[in-house]
Structure formats: structure tokens, C-alpha cells
Amino acid sequence: MGLGSRDYFRDGDGDMEWNSDAPAVRIIIITTLVALILQLVWTVPVPGGLDRESLLDRWLQMDTSAVLSGQIWRLVTYAFLHGLSPWHFIFNMLFLWWFGPTLERMYGTREFIAFYLSAAVAAALGGVAWDLSMQDSSKIVGASGAVLATTMLYTMHFPRQPIGLFFGLLTVEMRVLMAFLVFLDGFYALAQWGGRMGGTGVAHPAHLLGVAFGWAYFHFNWKITGLLNIFESLQERWKVYRARKRLKVFSPEPSSPLEEDVDRILAKIHEQGEASLTPKEREILTKASRAYRERR
């Protein structure tokens, strides 16, 4: 059974549908397609040369030296860009279209988006670690790390799911396909690490970190939006704490003996009238009146 035979890829007439109940997958694919078009047409001259380069690449591609200088947005934005080979874009988006909708339905749109972007960051950090270990600063574009994380998560849920390759000529289980992809990336990464092979133009370490993130997400039952909710809760508590610190609480001064005498005398006037006051009590009222005027 190939991927196209699953019920969530077909409508009533048996044709593939545009995953109407998986909005995150649609948004990611459309955004990536728009970015690819802009990469092709929005170009600027390369400094000191005759060639031209994509302005999106210049500002959004994964660049270890740029990230270390503070341009951390590249840890995410590179995943929406692709190289000049159309197959890079096509296969990444096909894998996302095949496996993403099921996961989005299982985890919810918000959690799936958080997973996809976090996987992209994890893959980018793998590229940074690789560059630092190799004393290099490579430039990376492509959704492969996040897509492989998605594929790995799908495999963890459905390891024995059959998938048809080469237009259905070969059918293998998801776990076999995933093992083959990991083997390829691992082989080339080790060959580069050992100096047996130069750059292949593929970010194999980033791919492997994406796979590892997908495995860890399933194995440890992570919920990224849950972590975000905790962070938001801490933010709210901090705001409440700051607000409380700015509040000025009125604390009345303790009653003095003079005020107690005044209260007693006023109560007496209320009950018996002013004529009932003794000379000493009148003197206390006069003294209290003078003290109140001085406070003002």
C-alpha cells in the first residue's frame, strides 16, 4: 500500500486532497514555496563579483558566523529557504505533505508548528556544533532537518506502516526507510569527519540532529506548547510581583494616649452633651486641636 492510498490523502473521488484539516502543513508549504520564488527573482550583485545572490539567502540562510554574532533568527528562517535544485524543495515538501497532516491531527496545529520550528532550531544547532568542531562556517538552507524530524516522529508512531517508493515499484516499512536515511546521513557525516570526503553540499549533521530531535520528542513525550505555557505563566507571575512591589500600602500610626483621650471625650459629648465636660477634659481637647493643626 502506498501513501496515496491512505484515506486522509483522498477525497470522495479518490484524488489527493489538499489536507483541509491540516492548516499548519499548508501554511508551511505555501510559505516555503513563496520563499523559493523570492529566492529566484529577488537577487542582488555579489560584492566584488559579477554573479548575483538571493537577498533572502543573504539575510535568512543559516550561517554559523552570523548566528554567533547575534543573528539568531537564522536558526529558524533557513528552514524556509532551499537551494537551486528543485528536487531539494520537492522532496522536502512531499515528505512534509505525506507525514505532517497525520501528526498535526494527532498533536494539534499549535503543537505541530512548535514541533516543526523547534526541530529546525535543533538541526541548525547541529550545524553550528559541526562547524565549530571542524573550524568551519558553512551556510545552510533547507527544511530537511525539520522534515526528517517529522518523518522520524511519524515512524515512531507507525513503524510498520508500508510506503510505496519509485511509483509503487518498491514497498518498504517506515522503519526501513528511516533506517536507510539515517544510514546515508551517518555515512557521509563520518566520512567528512574522518577527512575521507569533502563537502557534499548536504548538511548531513543537521539532518541527523533533526532525526534525533524527532526521536527524543516521542521518547520523552515532550509537549513544546506546554513549556511555552509554563513560560507565559512565569511571565504573568513576574508581572504580578512587580505590580505588588510598586503598591504603597497605608499603615496607620498607632493611637497615642492623647487620641485615646480625645475619643473618650467625644463619646462623652455625644452621650451627655458638651456641658458635662470637666475643665481638664476641655484642656485636653484644646491641646489635641493644637496638635492636629501642627500636623498639617
Image (spheres, rainbow, N blue to C red):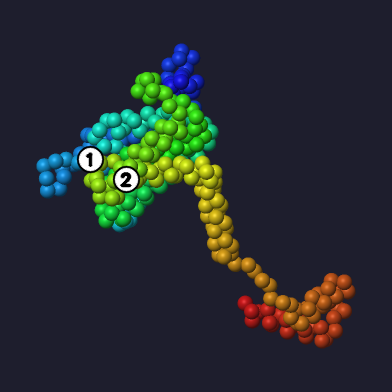
State the image coordinates of residue 253 (x, y, percent, origin top left).
Answer: 69, 76
Report which quarter residue 113 is drawn in.
Answer: top left
Report the residue at 55% width, 51% height from top. Answer: 230
Secondary structure of the residue carrying tag 1 is strand
Q: In this view, does 44 lie to the left or right of 262?
A: left
Compare residues 128 and 272 and report the one nearer the observer.
128
Q: Is residue 156 left or right of residue 132?
A: right
Compare residues 94 and 172 and report the one nearer the observer.
172
Q: Which amino acid does label 1 sit on?
A: Ser
Report the residue at 48% width, 45% height from top. Answer: 216
Label 1 Cα crowd, 10 Å radius (few <14 / some 14-19 / many 20+): some
Label 2 Cα crowd, 10 Å radius (few <14 / some 14-19 / many 20+): many
Task: Tell me how far mark 1 sits from mark 2, CA to CA.
Answer: 28 Å
Does residue 7 sit above or below 250 in this rendering?
A: above
Report the residue at 14% width, 41% height from top. Answer: 51
The residue identified by callout 2 is: 189
State the image coordinates of residue 141 (x, y, percent, origin top left).
Answer: 30, 41
Marks 1/2 in contact by CB < 8 Å: the verdict is no
Compare residues 186 and 250 and report the one nearer the observer.
186
Does residue 283 sit above or below 138 in this rendering?
A: below
Tell me the number on the disc at residue 54. Answer: 1
